[in-house]
Image (tube, rainbow, N blue to C red):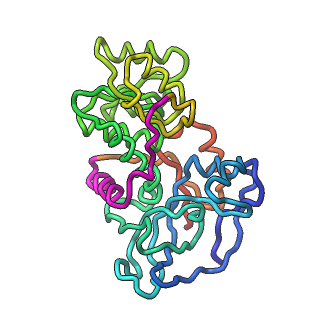
Amino acid sequence: MPRCVQFDEFGSRDALRIVDTERPWPGPGELVVRVMAAGLNAIDVKAYRDADVASRFGVTVPSCLGQDFAGFVEEVGEGVTRFTVGEAVFGSAPFRTFADFIVVQEDGAVLHKPDPLTFEVAGALATVGRTAVATTASIGLTEDDTVLVSAAAGGVGVLAAQLAVRAGATVIGTAASENHAYLDGLGIVPVAYGDGLADRVLAALDGGALTAVLDNHGRETIEVGIALGVPVERINTIAAFGPDALGARTVGGSAAGNEELAWLAGLLAEDECILPIDSIFPIERVIEAFARLEAGHVRGKIVLVTD
């Protein structure tokens, strides 16, 4: 029978389990996708750990998990014209993609997968990809900028940092030491996060000025940016909210849509941008996959596969 990842109570990844489900059928304007790969996201962890966070997204238990997917069109409903059975697709469908089959709207967040992209990369792209495009666009980077990107080896950070490099900016990225050589290879100046960050950023600036911040980690990065003279309108955060944002912009993935995601997928397909895959787990090992995510220092994305 078809399967999905479900949790019946909040608090821990140990509540995650594989359950049998009915095979879904498409209604008018819908398509059934056979999921091949689906990336893990931080929101999945927040949802199964915290009922209050889950409720903001309309999630109640029991609930499935998973935001992103890539796979094949299994069946189309009445009136569907953009997709045909057998085509490879990718996109997002909140809180249901860790499954063998999902139903998505033809006019929703689903796109044709570029042939060069693996299912693993495509299945991990939608959430972090839209967020990276939106956040970099929010502060209008140019070749005159030097930007600090926090969590620069993570899913959003590694894409945002590369997009900043493409815009001509000098990019300083925070990351764990084991990811420094990797970032350096992408044209990003790596620095360690934690105590003394402002001093390390100053050293990396080598007499220059910091002009923008893309925060994917939290208040610390925003504080460093402000301390080094960056105006709050040139700081964007996806990790600090309310008072913790300190007046910074809070543009996220909802500010980008299918057009922007297709553009980014094209860059990846042409090897002009990279989304590294940290690790791949079969869906049966979902708890191990989330243990890896929660351990931190992930390079890029962790992916579940159904076969």
- Give left or right: position of 106 versus 54: left
Percent from the top left, x then y, of residue 195? 55, 16
Residue 209's place in the image compared with 181, above or below, is above
| Residue at 40% over, 45% down | 132
Rendered image quadrant of residue 55: bottom right
| Residue at 40% over, 16% down | 228
Q: Residue 271: say if magenta.
A: yes
Q: What segment is highlighted magenta in the picture?
A: 247-272
Residue 181 visible within the image: no
- Give left or right: position of 11 versus 81: right
The N terminus lies in quadrant:
bottom right
Q: Residue 14: say if magenta.
A: no
Out of 238 and 299, give the one closest to the viewer: 238
Percent from the top left, x then y, of residue 33? 49, 74
Q: Count the marks: how many? A: 0
Out of 73 and 306, give the one closest to the viewer: 73
- Give left or right: position of 31 versus 112: right
Percent from the top left, x then y, of residue 51? 72, 51
Rendered image quadrant of residue 6: bottom right
* Residue found at the very far bottom of the displayed protein: 78
| Residue at 33% over, 39% down | 162
The C terminus lies in quadrant:
bottom right
Out of 279 and 149, give the one closest to the viewer: 149
Percent from the top left, x then y, of residue 21? 67, 75
Rendered image quadrant of residue 19: bottom right
| Residue at 44% over, 68% down | 108
Residue 298's place in the image compared with 29, above or below, is above
Residue 201 visible within the image: yes
- Give left or right: position of 96 versus 198: right
